[in-house]
Image: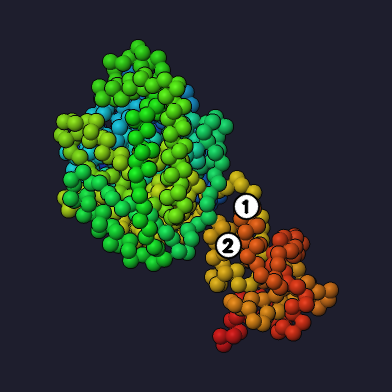
């Protein structure tokens, strides 16, 4: 081991430090427990695991880190994390922020199962607005969670504890939940990345429901890359959750991105929040390849009103069932008032609300059809605990202005840190997209980190340089395609593959039965690959994996004399790939000798 210094507590930094022998999980976990005991902010926890049990997990992780195969197979091996205390962990109590509701979980929630299988180490369970009902982080008998940057101010909710322990550097990431903004608002308030997946992308099995049809498990992390790494572990269909779906993603970012900006924004008289938003926009307007489209948020705000003023609040009442009948006095007074309001809605109201939502969905979709992503403030303001105590419902309602409509419309969201406010508090911005846009959000958010994200959590360390993210593992049908010319990686038409979510698998060669020709008069220049009966050569090709649903549109864009047929690779396999009509190469230059199009282009520059 080269050093005893604890590296920045991010997933990728920890993985690198483990691989290089700079630290190990036992040292990291011991250091974290020492810090948690010594530092302020303990109200962020509801249940810390026993130190000895966590150290044992760390020893197990350290042993497995010695095996390269384990390091490769377990992407979160030795990474410390926390979960919001409405998520089940086998053998630990689940309180949902209400002691009278507490029970010891018999099994892990689906997300905890996946994190355990990936090698992550659980530190403990975090405080929350009771029954995940609130955006303020103050509605808990375990105490109001102070903002790490100013304890007199809100940390955001309902995933208040998860945000606070991550920002303080006590874990590398934490899980929250997000129904009305409960993952995004605390991320923005605590200088974190908040990942709100597309509805159904991550299983909610083993999570105490708030609005079961809308609930999402959220991720709080220091960087977009870390959030994406965790989402890549969590995403996937789960038959135990009827609302879960297989990951089906839109393609990556288009080359010319249309970013929707609301025309009229409300900051509720907070000039510091408005100034931080304008500072973020100044940076964004310098971003290459982005055009800005003015959008009207009024139909989205109408959707948002359905969440608490419409029949969906009855779903919160359903979630508590008999407990509400027998233990109403155990609930926080504000939470009790909100949930009890669900008793005022009938089955007729529920259908009327559903019909209203579908009508509004069409109006919102007209806006979304004109843009690729939307940009909004994560929250319009940050409140002090005193202001929240004076008017708890009104202050909470203000915080959901740019979050409450998202889950009702099935959208995905990503909050990232923006320029700090003049009073030293964080200020987040949120990217929003249609269902399935998770990868687009992450890739654009990753790009924005360089100009917006100033420091990791409470540290002074800037986010590290980034690389292109891998798409989520997909269960959809794929096709392998051999590329031989202008669609090769880095060449002029490669974008046609990339924007269809294609990924490069390998560089290989054809069977030795082909000739390659430089086709005259093509723009950009292209080669033609022809199978011959004799005198052939092995020609270099790239194999790309393309979602089958995009294959037709890709083929439709290929102009004669080129086409897609079957070609044989050096290992004997037959795959779909670029071929050329034999008549088109009668007078074309034979460029087979260099062995491939890229090698031929290199000869032209000599």
The dot on residue 273 is none
| Location of residue 287 in the rendering, given as x and y in whole percent from the top left corner | 36, 65
Q: Which of 52 and 496 is in front in this view?
A: 496
Q: In this view, does 323 lie to the left or right of 333?
A: right
Can you identify the residue that label 2 sits on?
Answer: 497
The C terminus - image quarter: bottom right
Q: Residues within 10 Å of mark 1 (few under 14, many from 20)?
A: few
Q: Please, is residue 436 above or below residue 316 in the view? A: below
| Location of residue 59 in the rendering, given as x and y in whole percent from the top left corner | 43, 40
Q: Residue at x 64, y 49 (%)?
A: 477
| Location of residue 172 in the rendering, given as x and y in whole percent from the top left corner | 36, 45
Q: Nearer the viewer, residue 257 or 518?
A: 257
Circle nearer the N terminus (2, 1): 2
Can you identify the residue that label 1 sits on?
Answer: 549
Residue 80 at least partly seen = no
Q: Which of 103 and 252 is in front in this view?
A: 252
């Amino acid at each position: 081991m080269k050093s005893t210094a604890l590296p920045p507590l991010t997933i990728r930094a920890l993985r690198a430090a483990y691989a290089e022998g700079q630290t190990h999980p036992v040292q990291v976990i011991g250091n974290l427990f020492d810090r948690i005991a010594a530092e302020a902010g303990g109200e962020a926890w509801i249940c810390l695991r026993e130190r000895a049990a966590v150290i044992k997990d760390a020893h197990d992780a350290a042993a497995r880190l010695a095996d390269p195969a384990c390091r490769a197979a377990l992407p979160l091996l030795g990474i410390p994390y926390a979960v919001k205390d409405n998520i089940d962990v086998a053998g630990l109590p689940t309180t949902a922020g209400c002691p009278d509701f507490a029970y010891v979980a018999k099994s892990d929630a689906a997300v905890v199962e996946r994190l355990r299988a990936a090698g992550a180490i659980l530190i403990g369970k975090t405080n929350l607005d009771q029954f995940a009902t609130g955006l303020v982080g103050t509605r808990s008998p375990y105490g109001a969670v102070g903002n790490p940057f100013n304890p007199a101010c809100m940390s955001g909710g309902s995933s208040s504890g998860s945000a606070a322990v991550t920002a303080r550097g006590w874990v590398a990431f934490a899980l929250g939940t997000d129904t009305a903004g409960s993952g995004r608002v605390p991320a923005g308030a605590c200088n974190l990345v908040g990942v709100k997946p597309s509805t159904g992308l991550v299983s909610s099995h083993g999570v105490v429901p708030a609005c079961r049809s809308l609930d999402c498990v959220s991720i709080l992390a220091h960087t977009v890359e870390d959030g994406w790494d965790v989402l890549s572990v969590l995403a996937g269909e789960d038959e135990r959750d009827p609302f879960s779906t297989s990951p089906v993603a839109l393609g990556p970012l288009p080359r010319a991105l249309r970013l929707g900006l609301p025309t009229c924004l409300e900051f509720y008289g907070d000039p510091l929040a408005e100034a931080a938003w304008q500072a973020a926009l100044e940076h964004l307007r310098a971003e290459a390849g982005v055009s800005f489209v003015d959008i009207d948020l009024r139909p989205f705000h109408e959707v948002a009103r359905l969440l608490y003023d419409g029949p969906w609040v009855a779903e919160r009442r359903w979630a508590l069932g008999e407990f509400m009948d027998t233990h109403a006095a155990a609930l926080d007074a504000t939470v009790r008032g909100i949930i009890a309001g669900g008793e005022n809605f009938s089955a007729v109201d529920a259908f009327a609300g559903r019909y209203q939502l579908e009508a509004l969905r069409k109006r919102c979709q007209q806006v979304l059809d004109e843009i690729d992503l939307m940009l909004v403030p994560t929250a319009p303001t940050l409140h002090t605990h005193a202001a929240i105590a004076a008017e708890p419902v009104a202050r909470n309602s203000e915080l959901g202005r740019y979050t409450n409509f998202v889950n009702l419309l099935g959208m995905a969201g990503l909050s990232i840190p923006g320029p700090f406010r003049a009073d030293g508090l964080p200020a987040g911005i949120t990217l929003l997209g249609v269902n399935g846009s998770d990868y687009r959000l992450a890739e654009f958010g990753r790009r924005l980190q360089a100009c917006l994200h100033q420091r990791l959590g409470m540290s002074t360390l800037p986010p590290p340089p980034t690389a292109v993210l891998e798409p989520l593992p997909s269960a959809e049908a794929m096709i392998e395609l051999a590329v031989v010319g202008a669609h090769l990686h880095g060449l002029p038409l490669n974008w046609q593959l990339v924007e269809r979510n294609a990924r490069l698998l390998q560089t290989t060669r054809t069977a030795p039965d082909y000739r390659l020709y430089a086709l005259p008069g093509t723009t950009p220049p292209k080669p033609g690959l022809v199978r011959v009966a004799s005198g052939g050569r092995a020609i270099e090709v790239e194999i790309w994996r393309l979602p089958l649903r995009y294959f037709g549109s890709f083929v439709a864009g290929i102009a004669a004399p080129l086409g897609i047929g079957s070609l044989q690779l050096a290992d004997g396999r037959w795959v779909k790939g670029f071929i050329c009509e034999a008549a088109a190469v009668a007078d074309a230059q034979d460029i087979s000798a260099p062995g491939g199009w890229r090698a031929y282009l290199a000869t032209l520059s000599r």
